[in-house]
Each structure stands twice: as structure tokens, then as C-alpha cells.
Amino acid sequence: MGWNIKVDAGKCTGDGACKDACPVDVYEVKDGKAVPVNADECLGCESCVEACEVNAITVTEE
Ligand code: SF4
């Protein structure tokens, strides 16, 4: 069981708010977009979802 992270690249501004908010360093910002490179580490806390000002991120249980 894990967490499925989706970043809407059309909304993402690449400001890195999710990267700063995530306690386990799931995100990197690549080419101006947030990418969940360590999705396997996700705790499902939704801190990234709350931090994102443009609501680009959804986290759902797999
Ligand atoms: S839900 Fe929590 S642990 Fe998972 S990517 Fe977002 S901030 Fe990180």
C-alpha cells in the first residue's frame, strides 16, 4: 500500500512550495515543474497539497 501523487503540470508554477513542505523530500523541481521523484517515501500527510497555492497536487491512497 502506498500513495499516488499527481502533479498537474498545467497548473504547477514550479515555486517549490511542495518541496519545502514535504518532510521526506519527495519532490524535486525540474524544468520549472515539481516532480515527485521519491514517491515511494510518501507518508500521505498532504502537507504538499496544502502548501500548493494553485492546487496542482492530489495525493490519494493506492
Ligand atoms: S503527502 Fe506528505 S509525505 Fe507525501 S509528498 Fe506530500 S508532503 Fe511529502
Image (cartoon, rainbow, N blue to C red):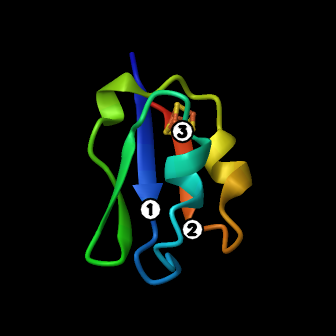
The front one of 17 and 47 is 17
Q: Is residue 55 left or right of residue 59?
A: right
Q: Give the image quarter of residue 2.
A: top left
Residue linked to disc 1 = 7
Which residue is rendered at x = 43% and y = 46% of the image? 5
Look at the numbered discs 2 and 3 and tell me whether their residues touch, using CB distance below 8 Å. no
Can you give x and y, in whole percent of width and height, for residue 9 in the image?
Answer: 40, 76
**Count of numbered marks:** 3
Which residue: 65% across, 51% down?
Answer: 49
Compared with 24, 33 (above or below) is below
User: Residue 39's x, y, as percent?
Assistant: 34, 36
Residue 11 coordinates in the image, percent (x, y): 53, 80
Q: Residues within 10 Å of mark 1 (few under 14, many from 20)?
A: some
Residue beneath disc 2: 56
Question: Which mark, by number, is residue 60?
Answer: 3
Q: Is mark 1 within 8 Å of ligand 1?
A: no
Distance, label 2 to label 3, CA atoms, is 13 Å
The quadrant the C terminus occupies is top left
**Which structural element holds mark 3?**
strand
Q: Residues within 10 Å of mark 3 (few under 14, many from 20)?
A: few
